[in-house]
Image (cartoon, rainbow, N blue to C red):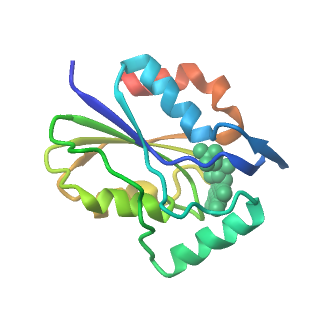
Amino acid sequence: MADSLIAFYSRADENYVNGELKTLTTGNTEIAANIIKGAIGADLFKISQARPYSKIYNECIAEAQSDQRRDARPEIEDYPDDIDRYDIIYIGYPNYWGTMPMAVFTFLERFNFSGKIIKPFCTHEGSGMGSSEKDIKRLCPLAKVEKGLAIRGGSVSKSKNDIERWATE
Ligand SMILES: Cc1cc2nc3c(=O)[nH]c(=O)nc-3n(C[C@H](O)[C@H](O)[C@H](O)COP(=O)(O)O)c2cc1C
């Protein structure tokens, strides 16, 4: 079987889920990443910002929007040693303002994905993948970017079968 890496960004803390503010102990995308790991047994890597966004939802959305408007590349705490040994890279993230968090842009620009298959998955509150697949293709022009999977953040656990099917196809 091909060697795979699941690299994901996810934020626990206060978030808006199905119309209500809730404090999550594990972020939605992290739950999805763990379901994929259970299905295919890949290595898991969490993309963490050196200076994380606020735990308070309203502050976080303002910070993330400001970073997106400035086309910022927030610093990431650390990276996988190398990605050469992986054939397939799953990239998971929440939809932030219509695309990926800017730290995922930082991550993707770090590596040469030539010849790799990228499988994007995204959790969201209604906007689906947004423009993230197009953005990944632009950032990783030498990769084969497969069709992504969009999952409602509040329904991640209920979507286990769909996530497993997509991950193994
Ligand atoms: C900063 C921020 C911006 C967001 N922007 C959008 C958006 O544009 N469209 C959308 O459907 N959901 C948006 N959401 C909701 C998240 O995509 C959703 O809650 C996701 O499941 C969070 O994943 P996580 O728990 O792994 O961080 C946003 C949430 C945050 C915190």
Question: Is residue 125 something one can see in this rendering?
Answer: no
Who's the residue at 45% across and 75% down the image? 72
Q: How far across and down, in percent of the image, does residue 154 sit?
A: 71, 37
Tell whether 71 sits left or right of 144. Answer: right
Q: How far across and down, in percent of the image, does residue 155 sit?
A: 69, 33
Depth check, front residue: 1 or 50? 50
The quadrant in which the N terminus is found is top left
Q: How far across and down, in percent of the image, does residue 84 sit?
A: 15, 41
Tell me: residue 74, above or below residue 88: below
Say which quarter of the image contains residue 85: top left
Which residue sits furthest right?
20
Question: Is residue 117 something one can see in this rendering?
Answer: yes
Tell whether 48 sits left or right of 135. Answer: right
Who's the residue at 48% across and 52% down the image? 48
Q: How far across and down, in percent of the image, does residue 151 sit?
A: 59, 38
The quadrant in which the C terminus is found is top left
Tell me: residue 140, above or below residue 1: below
Split into quadrants, the picture shows ligand 1 in the one at bottom right
Tell whether 47 sits left or right of 11. Answer: left
